[in-house]
Amino acid sequence: MLDTSIEKKEELKKEINAIDGEKNKVSYLAAQKDNDAKLEFLQNFKERESRDKIINSLEHKVSPDLFRIVYLAQRMIKEFIKSVYSSVSEDKLETVEISFNRTNVICDKLPENEEFEVNSKDKTIIISEKRRNSQSKVLGYVLYGYANCFSNRDSNENNKVLEEGNADIFADLVVNNYLKNHPYENLGFHLDKNYSIESKYLEENSIIRTRMYVLEQLKIDKKMLLEYLLGDKEKYIRNIFNGSPKVEEFNLNEFYEKNKFALKDINRESIYYNKNTILPLYILQEKIPNENILQKEFSSSDIIFKAFNHERINKIDSNKLDEIVNVMQDTNKIKDDLVEWTEKELENLTNMEKRMSSANILENVLVVLKYKKLNNNIAKQVKEVIQYLINDLERNVKIEKNKELIQAINEYSNKIEIEDKNLEEDLKDSLSYLKIKLEMSEEVNITPEVFFNRLRSSLKNSIKIERNEELIAYQTIKEELNIIKK
């Protein structure tokens, strides 16, 4: 391999200058084995044919079992770039081809906790041997690696937040663009339409994705991403940092104040919402406009109290609670004390409050159950609430949101998992019995036979019911339904 020190470069320059004709010069340079030497003198040639020949002569190696994934990744990247620009500039296309032709993609041993590694200086993407057969993951790692190599084509000095955040976004955008354009193509392995590369750079991702979300509202996000990777980084920085020519630290509150117009009604389907712990906070801030929740750390209970003006669990709307809790699950910047909040709320309710608002309380507990496991204490209190509901139904008291409660029980009761298994089964049986009662109140023409069949199929221990117990229960149900009137 040629020594590309100043002296050797000068020597090579003399050799090339001594050759007659551009084609002969290009052929001589293309025959060299040193990629750096070829690229050093590429600038001396302006003709497209000459430049292409030198670029195509660049050497790299790819592990044999990665060939298919590497060339799939290259095809995806080219298609993504063409989808962003109506006309792709020659310099950007050339940057892509140079990186493809000089970047090694190999499998090798890496530390246990490393899935892949990018050595931008040596232009090498290394995939952990343990992942060589995980094709969907390898695809993401290769795309991520190419993004790093595009960005660091001339140096290895970079801003970690910009580099890792943009590389991660690039991988996600490229795959999702390809799946959108080829929905029925059989790749030989599964790629979900919401494909996302696994990344350990959560903080970097969140900051860049939040900034890119604002650019998405202006419809320049993808162009600016490619500008950063393939073109003018300064242009990208001016756009992503609100006109500032310098990279600025991210301040949660200041960014929100500067970009309120773009952060209103945040679209959770945006690709920039994924792997983003910041945008969920902005959604919550929109829901609690009279409080600044961005300046210090809050807990789940803090957010709920502020969102519902300190209303108790027996008063708050379950649908709105679900909206709030659902968003809180998308960020790690809020202390999770949802279970503790539920337990404390139930403990502080009087028996009268539980009886008067039993349906609403149960709905809200089922919302929590959708996201969290209940503890023994909550389970015991919920059983009491369920009994109040059953008592009301037996007195023909109309339950508001009857159908919604049935649906919630159907969806979430199977998620019940608590330490005391006997209590767990008791609670499940109580919910099953309540569901039948609720269904019965909905269906005027239900018969005792149907009711009891539902009861037997719902209660786990129903097979132990003796025939005489069945007859007694059957008679009781008939009387309860007023089917037999004396």
Image (cartoon, rainbow, N blue to C red):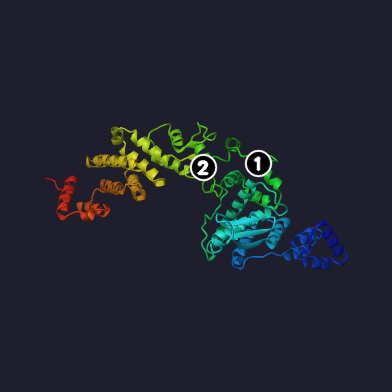
Q: Quadrant of the C terminus?
A: top left
Q: Is residue 343 visible to us here? A: yes
Q: Quadrant of the N terminus?
A: bottom right
Q: Is label 1 in a helix, a strand or a loop?
A: loop
The residue under label 1 is which amino acid type? Phe
**Is 367 on the left-hand or right-hand side of 95?**
left
Label number found at residue 205: none
The residue under label 2 is which amino acid type? Pro
- Above or below, comparing residue 421 to residue 20 in the picture: above
- Above or below, comparing residue 162 to residue 357 in the picture: below
Residue 241 at what x, y percent from top left?
65, 41
Front-most of residues 209 and 9: 9
Front-most of residues 86 and 335: 335
First of labels 2, 1 by sequence position: 1
Residue behind mark 2: 280
Q: Badge 2, how many Cα within 10 Å: few under 14, some, many 20+?
A: many
- Above or below, comparing residue 466 to residue 384 in the picture: below
**Is 473 on the left-hand or right-hand side of 196?**
left
Which residue appears at 71% of the width and 45% of the height? 234
Residue 59 at what x, y percent from top left?
71, 65
Asked if disc 2 and disc 1 are in contact, CB closer than 8 Å, the reply is: no
Q: Is label 2 in a helix, a strand or a loop?
A: helix
Residue 53 at what x, y percent from top left?
76, 66
Q: Identify the image quadrant of residue 261.
A: top right
| Mark 2 vs mark 1, CA separation in Å | 21 Å
Q: Is residue 85 visible to us here? A: no
Q: Count the labels in the image.
A: 2
Residue behind mark 1: 241
Residue 280 at what x, y percent from top left?
51, 42
